[in-house]
């Protein structure tokens, strides 16, 4: 069974940056549907007892298994996404992740510029990520459902750039959503925990 992680805050907790209607539809409709589709598609198959990473690695480049990959990946991506935000979050981090960002990208504002550019430049639906790849911090984007855990990378932070993540609050202004996410929502303690795991 693929689980949908509990929302770690109330649906209105991210206001005014992400409204309760967005969280309601995104969590209760979009995310819930990915999870139920994922479970329906793996039930009674060889994938039923595998962990999510194993399912994704085994289905990624198999066109006949694309629907399994897409739904399982989206189920995982969304559970991760909700943890990446918190009320009163955002701004520059402290501690180990702060020094790692400085050594990888020069400084925090350069990191900010790079991740916003990557997220704004993702054509169509997808995700922007901060990941560890071979021990190094990198910014990557993925299209549609694709996810770094299918490609041997360790996700530390993600931003959902599908329109359903921001359209009710920002319409076409993806850059404004990205600024709000970076300045006011990132849960850096969660990023730190991912780093330590
Ligand atoms: Mn989404």
Image (cartoon, rainbow, N blue to C red):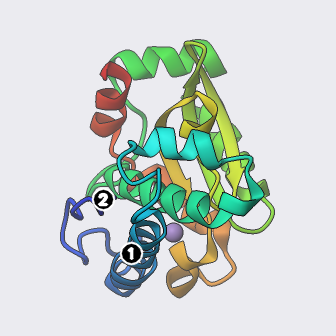
Q: Which residue is mark 2?
A: 1
At 35% from the left and 54% from the top, the residue drawn is 85
Image quadrant in which you'd find residue 152: top right
**Rendered image: mark on residue 77:** none
Q: Quadrant of the N terminus?
A: bottom left
Image quadrant in which you'd find residue 58: top right
Circle 2: is it few (<14), some (14-19), or many (20+) Cα within 10 Å?
Answer: some
Cα separation between marks 1 and 2: 9 Å
Front position in the image: 63 or 115: 63
Which percent across, then down, holds residue 59? 63, 49
Number of numbered markers: 2
Q: Earlier in the sequence, mark 1 or mark 2?
A: 2
SS label for mark 1: helix
Does the Cβ of the disc 1 residue fall within 8 Å of ligand 1? no
**Rendered image: mark on residue 36:** 1
Front position in the image: 27 or 23: 27
Front position in the image: 36 or 27: 36
Which percent across, then down, holds residue 154? 50, 29
Circle 1: is it few (<14), some (14-19), or many (20+) Cα within 10 Å?
Answer: some
Which percent across, then down, holds residue 74? 51, 61
Which percent across, then down, holds residue 162? 62, 70
Labelled pair 1, 2 in contact (Cβ < 8 Å): no
Front position in the image: 33 or 47: 47
At 46% from the left and 78% from the top, the residue drawn is 30
């Amino acid at each position: 069974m693929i689980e949908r992680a509990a929302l770690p805050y109330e649906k209105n907790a991210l206001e005014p940056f992400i409204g309760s209607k967005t969280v309601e539809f995104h969590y209760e409709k979009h995310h819930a549907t990915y999870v139920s589709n994922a479970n329906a598609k793996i039930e009674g198959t060889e994938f039923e007892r595998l962990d999510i990473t194993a399912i994704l690695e085994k289905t990624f480049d198999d066109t006949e298994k694309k629907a399994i990959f897409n739904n399982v990946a989206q189920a995982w991506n969304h559970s991760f996404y909700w943890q990446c935000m918190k009320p009163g979050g955002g701004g520059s981090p402290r501690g180990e992740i702060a020094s790692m960002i400085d050594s990888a990208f020069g400084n925090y504002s350069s990191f900010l510029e790079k991740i916003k550019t990557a997220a704004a430049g993702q054509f169509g639906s997808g995700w922007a990520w901060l990941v560890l790849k071979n021990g190094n911090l990198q910014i990557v984007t993925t299209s549609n459902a694709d996810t770094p855990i299918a490609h041997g990378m360790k996700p530390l932070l993600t931003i959902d750039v599908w329109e359903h993540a921001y359209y009710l609050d920002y319409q076409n202004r993806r850059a404004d959503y990205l600024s709000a996410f970076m300045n006011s929502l990132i849960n850096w303690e969660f990023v730190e925990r991912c780093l330590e795991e």
